[in-house]
Amino acid sequence: MKLFLYLPTIVFLLALTAFSQVTVTVNNGYGSGKYRGSRPIHVWAEANPPNMVFDRWTGDTDLLIDVNAWHTRISPKRKNITLTATYKSAPAWNPVYQTINGRIYGYHFPANIRGLVFRFHGTGGFATTFFNRLEDRSHADDFVSAGFAVVALDSDDRVNKQWSTVLPPNNVDVNNVQAIINLFISQGLISTTTPIFSTGMSNGGAFSPRVAYVLQFKAAAVYCAQGSAFVNITNIPTIWNVQQFDDHENVGAAGNATALSNSQTLANRGIATQFNVNIPSPVYPQRFARIPGLTLSDSQTIYNSLKNNGFLDRDNYLLQPPNTSGWQNFIPAAYQSKLDEISIHLNVCFTAHQFFSDYNNRVIAFFNDRL
């Protein structure tokens, strides 16, 4: 009798358990598998094929947080989900390097440009970072494929390698940016009406809204910084992208809260703004094949060294901040020359203080809206 009374409940629970298991199939990407539990389901596109960049997902895209992002999450509202990563043509290119007032800058102009984007490095950085470092180059490639010219320059301060906070007209970094613009106009690469934008990481993120306001750019993007410059008076649309567990002494949880407050200040003043938080993601076994020179087999070996030595939990999330966990000591000797690139990926996955390409499409869309 008791069994009969409770049988409907048992059947219901079994059905609920079966339905809660989600099967994900990812073509041209990663994240396929069976999922059960409360953690987000992440999917990633494969590394860009030669002369191509990620375009969008197809398939059950109504379940995606962001159909245009190479790394995104699924809202699992049904049991079986199929997704395919698609790509679009993007001609190969390399930057041209020149100097302005004794400082290096690099640039590239695609055909029929729609706008010009300046990129500002973080403390200790260089113009070359934007064109040579993994996540940064992905950022540059996506902007070029979207029809934007890209330019990056060294800060005038080559000791601390930081951007000046001096007010105009005595801010040498702002003056160098203006000089580059004037040079491009004189060379016929842009006109006086070409839309100009700025992006920056960390110290460069703090500088991005500053130079955008002074030179009246169309919009600014801030990465991993508070971006407080002129927030109470600026008329420049600004997008913030922050890491959830940013561990930089000048950012952290308090800095992220200030960044959010700054975005809300703009919104309250009727200025277009957006605030995005990158949340932690698993270290999937194929992640490191995005590093030039590494194969899927290499990536699996690096992943195994992390997994087998206790740096990842059962869902492949990092258990400790990669800047202090000592994972480097367990990477095979054959990959010691790649530690810097591996570190970038781990910091992105953990959401530490690191530039990330996950929201390239959001920044491009935000800039497109200003055209």
Image: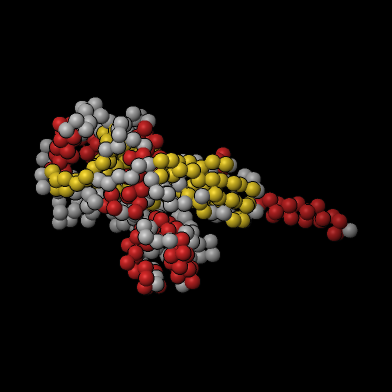
Quadrant location of the N terminus?
A: bottom right
Q: Nearer the viewer, residue 53 or 369?
A: 53
Quadrant location of the C terminus?
A: top left
Where residue 281 appears, as percent x and y from the top left, is 47, 55
Q: Residue at x 25, y 45 (%)?
A: 95
Q: Nearer the viewer, residue 155 or 262?
A: 155
Q: Residue at x 32, y 50 (%)?
A: 136
Going by the picture, which residue comes out furthest to the top? 193
Where residue 267 appears, as percent x and y from the top left, is 37, 33
Q: Is residue 295 above or below residue 149?
A: below
Q: Residue at x 23, y 42 (%)?
A: 107
Q: Nearer the viewer, residue 231 or 315?
A: 315
Q: How many marks?
A: 0
Whether residue 85 sits left or right of residue 211 in the image: it is right
Please indicate, yes or no, whether residue 327 appears anywhere in the rendered image: yes
Q: Residue at x 27, y 46 (%)?
A: 94
Whether residue 76 sits left or right of residue 160 in the image: it is right
Where residue 91 appears, as percent x and y from the top left, is 35, 42
Where residue 103 appears, as percent x and y from the top left, is 14, 48
Please indicate, yes or no, whether residue 205 appears anywhere in the rendered image: no
Whether residue 22 sits left or right of residue 279 in the image: it is right
Check the image and tell me how it is coloured: secondary structure
Q: Is residue 110 above or below residue 25?
A: above
